Amino acid sequence: MTPDPSSPAIALRAPLGAVVPAERARPDMRLLGLLALGHMVIDINQGSLPAILPVVKDALNLSYAATGVIVLTANITSSMIQPLFGYLADNTARRWLLPLSVLLSTVGLAFLGLAPSYAAVLALVMVTGFGVAAFHPEGYRTATAVAGERKTTGVSIFSTGGNIGIALGPPLMTALLIGFGPAGSLGMLVPGLLVTGLLALSGMLLGSAHIRPIGPLACLSFLIAAAWIEFRWSAKAQSVQS
């Protein structure tokens, strides 16, 4: 039987159980904003290193070669080991790394101005580098996860936070060092600990849907407490010396 082309078309009902999306999934802009904020703080810490290097060089009477090793250490720990964290992120989500990595990068950089020796400088730079390396793969993974079908938009928002951080890092560190001397690097604790708390709190409120801090949260709380105790001790030591 030949169908009549003049007859009206009849819409077929979707099969039972089929999902017909009404619209594309929208990105979660609040979470993307928070991730971009974390990325900004991470790259503020990373970008602040060149600004504090002259202070460290003069304080410890370092040669240019020794100062270059500091930069080399920062680049190795923050960049060359990122594929390892990317491999781990591909295997399973470790969203608790987001607040932990922000905390590590912040603590390492904040106490750099008070480092008593060259070995301590290298150790603090490595801590900062590990935090930077751990954040980026998991951050990009989480950004694409909460961006719905607009993954390019989500990654763009996340990347913008990092670009802003790279731009803000040197002038912010320079202003702190000019205003407060080498101890001014402790001022980096303010944005770092604030964003660390926001990332951890968002995980507690959202549960397993996005960030899972259960388990590592105890370790994170311990590190925050340790950073606060060290900050208070350093402030007291500075007041005694003055």
Image (spheres, grey):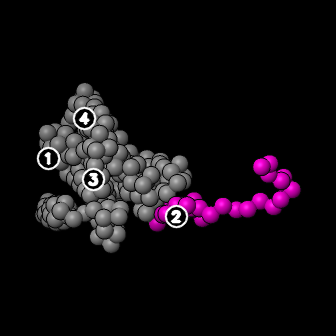
* Residue with the mark numbered 1: 116
Q: CA distance from mark 4 to mark 2?
A: 59 Å
Sequence-first disc among 1 and 4 = 4
Q: Position of residue 149 (x, y in %)?
A: 52, 54
From the viewer's perspective, is 147 left or right of 116?
right
Dominant secondary-structure state across the stretch colored magenta: loop
In the rendered structure, which amino acid carries the disc numbered 1?
Pro
Residue type, label 2: Leu
Q: Residue at x 24, y 31 (%)?
A: 69
From the image, state whether disc 2 or disc 3 is nearer to you.
Answer: 2
Q: Residue furthest bottom?
A: 205
Residue marked by disc 4 = 73
- Which mark sits nearer the N-terminus, 3 or 1? 3
Q: Residue 94: which disc?
A: 3
Residue 11 x, y percent position in the rendering: 70, 62
Residue at (20, 51) in percent of width and height = 114
Residue wearing tag 2: 16
Residue 161 to residue 65: above or below? below
User: What residue lies at 62% left-to-right and 63% top-to-bottom?
Assistant: 13
Question: CB of mark 3 within 8 Å of CB of mark 4?
Answer: no
Q: Residues within 10 Å of mark 1 (few under 14, many from 20)?
A: few
Asked if the magenta segment contains residue 18, the reply would be: yes
User: Which numbered disc, 4 or 2, marks the residue that appears first in the sequence?
Assistant: 2
Q: Nearer the viewer, mark 3 or mark 1?
A: 3
> In the structure shown, which secondary structural element does the residue marked by tag 3 occupy?
loop
Question: In the picture shown, does residue 229 fall above or below 133?
Answer: below
Could you tell me which secondary element the residue under label 1 belongs to?
A: loop
Q: Earlier in the sequence, mark 3 or mark 4?
A: 4
Q: Quadrant of the C terminus?
A: bottom left
Kind of residue indicated by mark 3: Arg
